[in-house]
């Protein structure tokens, strides 16, 4: 009630509260205001979500309830292609970061768009696989294996979707404001997020798909 | 990584000890990832070893190797970024992940082993 905050600098230009170097205490460790460390901690907590889903799949991944097994369902060629889509998107994002380092706006946006394209290919292949499975009657409610499979792979796909939405938003912000310090910070965060998703996918294709189809 | 990137764009841009990589680093990481992706798919699709356990162990080792490659070349993990706190958080998370995974599998395996055998008729009447 007493906090009727009309902040003193509300009339000023747009300012984002994390300013690079604002908290530099001479040690030089938190020159970015600790955003990178904070985002890394978020990623680690996300890692725990995936760990729980992986653990669930490890426990029930072979409980088929007399339904289809991974060897019946999975098309490894398709998974190899989507793995490469994600790998391509990782390196193209790396190229975007290198262009950002050189302060070149247009190539940064172009590489971001290429990354988005490969991410969309990955997501399209995943949705195609899901619809194919459901069409064959391998729905999440068919067996414990399929429940945990759809939850784990679907959660990863949801993360990729969110990353792609972020890419669009960041592309617009880059287009409007250019390579300002705030946008560079956002590009760095999205970079960590995107590469992290690729790391999780390594676990998914190794553990769920490849080890799943082994007899 | 640190040696090449320190010289290429100077330490003053990255006081936190972070580097955003170099073209060389990304290409090396990408090529290593391609190799480490193709080998496990080849092992499974061509059924090279003929032994599930051996193949599974190889897949896991190659997966861990590729995760390390990604961490180093794409995520630029090193002991000096953010004063070592990112690495500390990572190690802590890896410990938690291992406890979650191994613990779940261990407990549930023993649960399955120690369960009373159930006939198919019993199974049908389970709520």
Image: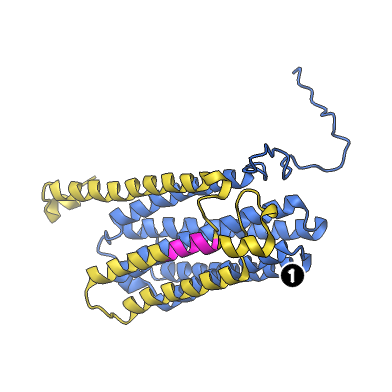
Tell me what hue chain B is rendered in: yellow
Residue plotted at (59% across, 72% down): B24
Up/down of A150 relative to A33, above or below: below
Chain that the image shows in blue: A
> Which residue is under mark 1?
A107
> Which range is magenta?
B66-74
Residue plotted at (83% across, 43% down): A14
Image check: B50 left or right of A35?
left
Image check: B67 left or right of A165?
left
- What element does badge 1 sit on? helix
Local crowd size for mark 1, using a 10 Å CA cut-off: few (<14), some (14–19), many (≥20): some
Image check: A182 left or right of A29?
right
Q: Within the image, what quadrant is residue A34 found in? A: top right
Q: Position of residue A194 (x, y in %)?
A: 57, 59
Q: How many marks?
A: 1
Up/down of A189 relative to A211, above or below: above
Q: Position of residue A39 (x, y in %)?
A: 58, 47
Residue plotted at (46% across, 67% down): A130
């Amino acid at each position: 009630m007493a906090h009727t905050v009309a902040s003193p600098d509300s009339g000023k230009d747009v300012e984002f509260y994390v300013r690079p170097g604002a908290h530099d205490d001479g040690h030089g460790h938190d020159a970015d205001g600790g955003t990178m460390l904070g985002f890394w901690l978020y990623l680690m907590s996300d890692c725990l979500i995936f760990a729980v889903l992986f653990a669930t799949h490890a426990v029930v991944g072979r409980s088929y309830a007399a339904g289809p097994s991974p060897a019946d369902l999975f098309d490894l060629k398709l998974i190899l292609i989507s793995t490469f889509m994600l790998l391509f998107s990782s390196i193209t994002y790396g190229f975007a970061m290198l262009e950002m380092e050189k302060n070149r706006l247009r190539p940064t946006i172009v590489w971001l768009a290429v990354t988005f394209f490969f991410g969309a290919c990955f997501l399209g292949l995943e949705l195609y696989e899901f619809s194919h499975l459901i069409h064959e009657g391998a729905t999440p409610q068919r067996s414990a294996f399929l429940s945990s499979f759809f939850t784990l792979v679907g959660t990863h796909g949801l993360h990729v979707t969110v990353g792609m939405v972020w890419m669009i938003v960041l592309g617009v912000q880059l287009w409007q404001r250019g390579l300002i310090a705030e946008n560079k910070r956002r590009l760095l965060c999205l970079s960590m997020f995107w590469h992290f998703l690729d790391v999780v996918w390594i676990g998914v294709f190794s553990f769920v798909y490849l080890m799943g189809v082994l007899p | 990584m640190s040696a090449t990137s320190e010289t290429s764009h100077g330490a003053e841009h990255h006081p936190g000890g972070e580097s955003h990589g170099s073209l060389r680093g990304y290409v090396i990481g990408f090529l290593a990832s391609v190799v480490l992706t193709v080998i496990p798919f080849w092992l499974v699709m061509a059924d090279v070893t003929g032994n599930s356990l051996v193949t599974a162990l190889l897949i896991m080792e190659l997966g861990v190797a590729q995760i390390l490659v990604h961490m180093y070349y794409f995520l630029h993990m090193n002991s000096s970024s953010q004063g070592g706190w990112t690495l500390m958080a990572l190690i802590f998370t890896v410990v938690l992940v291992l406890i979650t995974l191994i613990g779940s599998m261990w407990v549930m395996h023993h649960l399955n082993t120690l369960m009373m055998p159930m006939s198919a008729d019993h199974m049908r009447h389970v709520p």
